[in-house]
Image (tube, grey):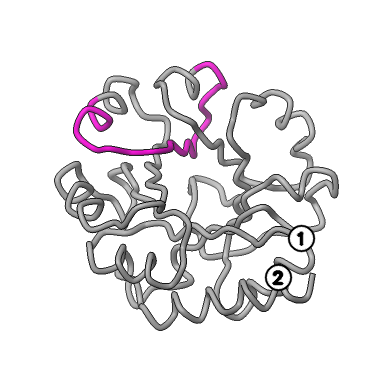
Amino acid sequence: MPRTRVKICGLTRPDDALAAAAAGADAIGLVFYAQSPRAVDAAQARSVLALLPPFVTSVGLFVDADPAFVRGVLAEVPLDLLQFHGAEPPDYCAAFGRPWIKALRVRPGLDLARAYLDYDGAAALLLDTYRPGVPGGTGQSFDWGLIPEALAPSIVLAGGLDPDNVAEAIRRVGPWAVDVSGGVEAARGIKDPAKIAAFMNGVRDGDRSR
């Protein structure tokens, strides 16, 4: 059974990137969405990535951004992977010459099997919690029973995960990866190294019990 990969999202400080990498995170996320309390600009993003050790993937998160804005960020920030959290169609997501993830906000009636086919060029689908008007970072989980069993091993699970529930999430869903932001914070955009370490321990506990 492969281990569950981990992305720590919403980083704003170099020290938090170091803490995530030291704890064993596979990826870190930088939010390029001005309305988010975890938003960074290109200069902040570069300062975070400057201290990131090798083999930790850098992910840039965008929400219905103008293509010129995305290209401008890519010209200044060495991102490995893009994550799209709005209503972006597949051709938009594929237009930037980087591997990409499409985030979907899960609610009853969403056809995840259809979305999997529609976004077949994505490196993965990230499943987050639906809340009207909020593209992500709600701090709330959704009904994991809505995830088709056949898709679970290939998805990135997000939405309200924290050190207390991530092991259960892994046991019940069996995702390829988990994504956490608010669940490991001391304050909005400020990560807590102890919570990051506890989250990673929860992931390992979940893996052992799968």
Front residue of this view, candidates 135 and 52: 52
Q: Neighbour class for label 1 at 10 Å: few (<14), some, many (≥20)?
A: few
Q: Amino acid at mark 2?
A: Asp
State whether residue 127 is above or below residue 92: below
Q: Residue at x 43, y 36 (%)?
A: 82
Kindly check if marks 2 and 1 are in contact, taking CB atoms under 8 A apart as contact. Answer: yes
User: Does the stretch in magenta take in 205?
Assistant: no
Q: Is residue 6 left or right of residue 187?
A: right
Q: Which residue is mark 1?
A: 1
Residue 91 spot, x, y in % from top left: 53, 16
Residue 48 spot, x, y in % from top left: 23, 55
Q: Residue at x 72, y 32 (%)?
A: 116
Front residue of this view, candidates 155 and 55: 55
* Residue 37 appears in the figure: no
Q: Residue at x 84, y 44 (%)?
A: 150
Q: Is residue 90 left or right of residue 48?
A: right
Tell me where residue 43 sits by quadrant: top left
Looking at the rendered image, the quarter that the N terminus falls into is bottom right
Q: Residue at x 77, y 29 (%)?
A: 114
Q: Neighbour class for label 2 at 10 Å: few (<14), some, many (≥20)?
A: some
| Secondary structure type for disc 2 | helix
Query: Which region is colored magenta?
Result: 72-91
Tell me where residue 41 sits by quadrant: top left
